Amino acid sequence: MTCAGSSNTPRSATEGPLSELLVVDLSRAVAGPHATMMLGDLGARVIKVEAPGTGDDARGWGPPFMTTEGQEQESTYFLSVNRNKESICLDLKAAADIEVLEGLVRRADVLVENFRTGVMDRLGLGAARLAELNPQLVILSITGFGHDGPEGGRPGYDQIAQGESGLMSVTGSGPDDPQKLGTPICDLLSGMYGAYGVLAALHERAHTGRGQHVRTSLLAAAVGVHAFQGTRWTVAGEVGRAAGNHHPAIAPYGLFRCADGSVQIAVGTEAQWRKFCNSFGLDPAFPGLSSNPERVARREELIALVEKAFSTWNAADLLDRLNEVGVPAGKVRSLDEVYTWDQTRSQGLLVDVDHDSLGKITLPGPPLRFFEPSGAERTRTGHRAPPRLDQHGRAVRSWISDRTDPQAVSTNEH
């Protein structure tokens, strides 16, 4: 990829495939910061612009907080979406600080913001002004419900979007029990879609030399993952409803009780159904249950049959047996079990970093791994802890003011 607007000195491949990119992050909370963290995980240099005094909204979200030796509080919420970034505080209503920001924009490849519609224009940083400063700039804007349309500009928070987008209506123990997901899924998905759009725009820029404006929203991201629940309505005219821990279109597929707890199974093919039945004393040709549509229609009867077959098994032995016969199965792990699981660590899903005030901490890591054709893994080195507020402000300001060598700056300076 030709990074025509890049301002960074090229780095080694082990620092990530985006190591020549500079990202200016004006976003806060979760959606935008998750997008920029994804880019930072891939090696981009991300400079996070924060409000003086308070910083990103998420710095105040908790508990839990971690208290430093100096009695400062660090929000674990903030730590979750801001690794591999630098922090500078800028007052976007102050002319001197706008000048610093414009200096960053001139050098940047990407700018990310998730202000409400119209805020960037009021700051004098609308799309036209940004293009004037840097015609090659890729801009990512994330809103709650979209920039236009009859409800464009509505403020968006994750749980509101989960409800408005229909996700809560298909999540919960039943139709009368809508539930939100346990993570801010609309925020995270909009960040993921945003990063995906940025990479597409950068790829196109390599051919055209021009930047462009990428837009997404919490609503768009949530609707974008409706999957079969979406076509269930748009094609079949059927409104999906929450079905608890059992799949609405595949059976048996869900959480089933056994002698000392429960296990999850996913019988997704007729071949797996036959294997399952033969292993647990069930008749695969049982009247009314011999095909998946029949089993879905008679789900309650099926659940009773399966749980009766499981009633003499403890969970550990049952999972071993299911694995032995080739039926996908698993248990429901608590988060502490997930993070102490050898498989989690083996996939690079935890990274150890040195935080400026907390010392060595462990963070959930990036979900991608890269390999050479030879099979050798390209390991990203030097993941960085989320920054303290304005931790890199002096270094970034010094860099912006250095007109003689726009590439000379140490990103490790505090």
Image (tube, rainbow, N blue to C red):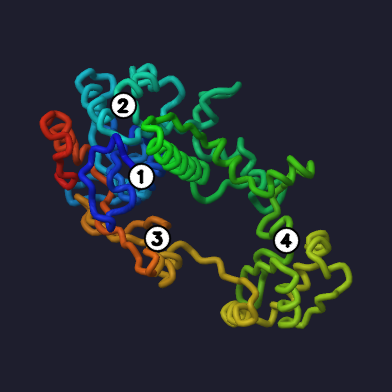
Q: Is residue 87 left or right of residue 131?
A: left
For marks 3 and 2, the one nearer the N-term is: 2
Relative image position of residue 212 (x, y in whole percent):
42, 30
Location of the C terminus (image quadrant): top left
Asked which secondary structure carries label 1, the reply is loop
Q: Residue at x 57, y 41 (%)?
A: 222
Q: Residue furthest front?
A: 207
Q: What residue is pinned by disc 1?
A: 1
Neighbour tally class for label 3: few under 14, some 14-19, many 20 plus, Cα within 10 Å: few
Asked which secondary structure carries label 3, the reply is loop
The residues tagged by marks 3 and 2 sit, at their Cα atoms, a distance apart of 32 Å
Residue 52 in sight: no
Q: Is residue 319 left or right of residue 311?
A: left
Q: Are marks 2 and 4 in contact (CB under 8 Å)?
A: no
Q: What residue is pinned by disc 4?
A: 250
For marks 4 and 3, the one nearer the N-term is: 4
